[in-house]
Image (cartoon, rainbow, N blue to C red):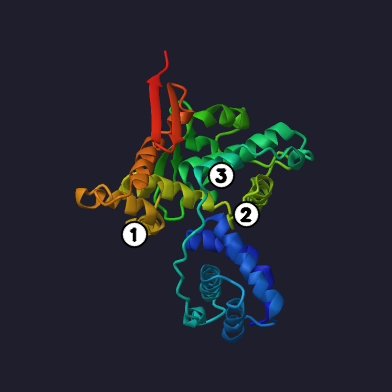
Amino acid sequence: MDITILQPLLPDFISWARLEKDSNMETARKQVYILRLIFRTYPLFNLENCRDFVLHSKDTKKASTIEKYIHAIRVFCDFLMWRGMIKENWGKSIPIPKRDKNVPTILTSAEIELLLNCSLSRTYGHSPNPELSKMVFDTILSILAKTGSRLGEVLGMKIKDINLTEDIWTLNETKTRTGRLIPIPPDLNANLRTIIGDRKPDDNIFLNPINGKPIRHHQLENNFRLRLKKCGITKPAIVHTLRHSFITELLRQDVSVLKVAMIVGHDNIKTTQDYARLLTEDLRMAMMRLPLNAKYCTTDDVLTHIKQTFETFHLKNDGRFNYSVEEGPEGIRIDISVKD
């Protein structure tokens, strides 16, 4: 089918996908972006050219990206069938590649704190309100890091969705179509009140202070990359890494898999269980608690385990306690007392 005929149909495709496929706006826009990539490369939209597009993309793109390409082609074919322009969805004959279960990048709590506290004053200099711009981006990244939410979920937050009296966020528009309640970290309450101001309940919470439009994914990714560079963190991290790190840390803190799945919105608990692969060292230390194994641990392993156990309480940053750890050749001395 000639591309010149299909180009004008893309706005109608977005409306159709949102209504018939129940797609959210961000998903529909991404599919249009993929279709335009194909339209710029080939004069005709047909099975042969789409197969060629997917084949060449495999050399440079991940399996998850290829899957999105094929899904966009299939959905657009459904749209063309709905309009009576083709008789069958030939996009379904393009096989979806299997995803590799690679170990995701994980940031430590210390690295995340560095990123959240990173000052990018020059970045916001072109904004009419630099302080508000900084607060907006800082708050978005803090919510991502402290709740494990998806970026699209946070950017789609409406004022009517949050209750700042009880610090609860009611999330209905999710990737899995399953709503959930998310506690809002209390330290973000003041920021959110300032950002919201006296705007209407149906407004997005996070707007670009420069043009007043909702903040887009790429703007957050750019801001995140600048933070990584300034903090000297060389790990291949992206914004979604905050979600991986959140899930992994909760599992490391012995939070049940079921609770973690409920918090982050996994509709299949197996998805959450996959993160257990990242806890090899933690599992080894857990096995050392078995009396049959414990007696064969080195003294260094025992002391390390004791220290790590106390660190899970985060007493160093808890203003209610006096907490200190002294390490020497003879062992570890830990002092804990409640402040008056």
How far across and how far down the image is residue 331, in percent? 39, 37
Quarter-wise, where is residue 323 in the image?
Answer: top left
Marks 2 and 1: which is nearer the front? 2
Q: Are marks 3 and 2 in contact (CB under 8 Å)?
A: no
Residue in the foreground of this view, choosing between 116 and 194: 116
Circle 1 — which element? helix
Residue situated furthest top in the rendering: 340
How far across and how far down the image is residue 114, in percent? 59, 40
| Quadrant of the rendering where the C terminus is positioned | top left
Residue 270: mark in rendering = 1
Q: Residues within 10 Å of mark 1 (few under 14, many from 20)?
A: few
Marks 1 and 3: which is nearer the front? 3
Amino acid bearing label 1:
Lys
Q: Residues within 10 Å of mark 3 (few under 14, many from 20)?
A: some
Residue 297 located left or right of residue 266: left
Amino acid bearing label 2:
Thr
- Picture layout, residue 52 above or below residue 308: below
Q: Residues within 10 Å of mark 2 (few under 14, many from 20)?
A: few
Residue 234: mark in rendering = 2
Residue in the foreground of this view, choosing between 60 and 34: 60
Which residue, given by chain and number where applicable, does mark 3 sit on? 111
Identified at 68% across, 42% down, the residue is: 208
Identified at 45% across, 26% down, the residue is: 318
Amino acid bearing label 3:
Glu
How far across and how far down the image is residue 171, in percent? 45, 43
Q: Is residue 6 visible?
A: no
Residue in the foreground of this view, choosing between 278 and 45: 278
